[in-house]
Image: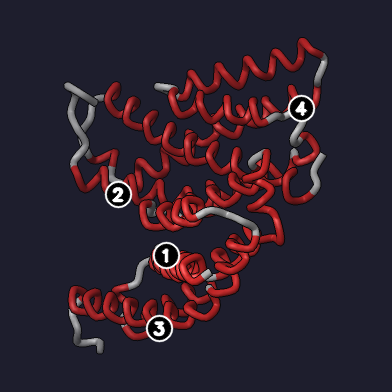
Amino acid sequence: MSEEKKLPADVTRALNRLVTIWSDGDGYRQAVALAESHSHLLPKPVTHAQLNGLRNVVGAAPDPKTVKMFTDNQRDKAYRRGDLELRDYWAEVGTALTRLRESAQALWAEAGGEEVGLSKKEAKAARAQVHMGLMRAFVQHLVAHSLYLPATKGGS
Amino acid sequence: MNELTREQQERLARHAIQRAVARESDRFFDRAQSPAEKLRAVDLKRAQVHGLENIAYSTDRLSDIYDFLKKQMGRPGKLGQRWRRENVGQDLLSALSGLSREANQIARTVAAEYPEAIDDDASRRIHLELCREYLKHVAAHYQYGEAVE
């Protein structure tokens, strides 16, 4: 948002608050459910290295498209190796992260983002950053639960 | 009570919540002793215990605390084993998430008295405060136990 119009402080505060609430609520539940539904793939073929890789990519990615490219690449690599379960895992992770765009849109509207008067380009960029915030929270929960499951419940 | 402005209700509600959290905190003092002893028994170091306490105080998200504990329990090697030994990490995770009951009760009680002051997120924020209080006592008992050993 550097030289473009900045969000008013109250909208930024509202967004941060809503993302926090989402992270502790729906975001946490959805991520845990995704991990649980693939517990049979933990700790292999979904390894610590793959999970940490996902967390690093999402942490550094400038936009949601970069994250989608990563998950699509992981999906395609698994397919080429003949690991169809792993392929499906990465496909589901990619879908789950992409779908967070709808939640981001809802939070953006609830925080008053639509009333700020940004240009179309600025609004799109701002919503993308909200989407990234949700992705980062989701992946944090997914990775933590995915590391925890096999270690504590005798997963595969 | 219905003559109070929203601002007055919010101020009184904040005090009521602080008092309720303080009362719960005093109850945690005894409850926190056993987990603290377990942390020492499984040979978890002070840095680990204070790391957990620091997470609770530096975040505004409950899920950050849960994720920290899960990651610790999921770690390979000796450190992960210590967090999993005698269910010390799992018991802490269960104890902290279980504080939602007390948090909901406090939120309901205060909302009954000051309905305009309590929003949908109040229970979650109270839960976070309770987690901080609980971990504060666990860390204190841990440190005391180390010192007198």
Can the viewer see residue B123 in this picture?
Answer: no
Total marks in image: 4
Report the disc number at residue A14: 2
Residue on which disc 4 sits: A45
Badge 2 crowding class, 10 Å Cα cut-off, few under 14, some 14 to 19, many 20 or more, is some
Q: Quadrant of the N terminus of chain A?
A: top left
Asked whether the beta carbons under mark 1 and mark 3 sit within 8 Å of each other, the answer is: no
Quote the CA–CA distance across marks 3 and 4: 48 Å
The circle drawn on residue B132 is 1
How many C-alpha atoms fall within 10 Å of the one at disc 4: few (<14), some, or many (≥20)? some
The kind of residue tagged 2 is Ala
- Mark nearer the viewer, 2 or 1: 1
**Chain of residue at mark 3:** B
Mark 4 or 2: in front is: 4
C-alpha separation, residue under disc 1 versus residue under disc 4:
37 Å
Query: Marks 4 and 2, Cα distance to the nearest angstrom?
Result: 40 Å
Q: Are marks 2 and 3 on the same chain?
A: no
State the residue at coordinates (18%, 28%): A5
Earlier along the polypeptide chain: callout 1 or callout 3?
3
Q: Residue at x 34, y 51 (%)?
A: A17
Determine the secondary structure under disc 4. loop
Give the side of residue B136 with respect to residue B93, left or right: left
Check contact, mark 2 vs mark 1: CB within 8 A.
Answer: no
Proximity of marks 1 and 4: CB atoms separated by less than 8 Å:
no
Amino acid on which disc 1 is placed: Arg
Q: Position of residue B138 (x, y in %)?
A: 49, 68
Give the residue at x 44% y 22%: A61
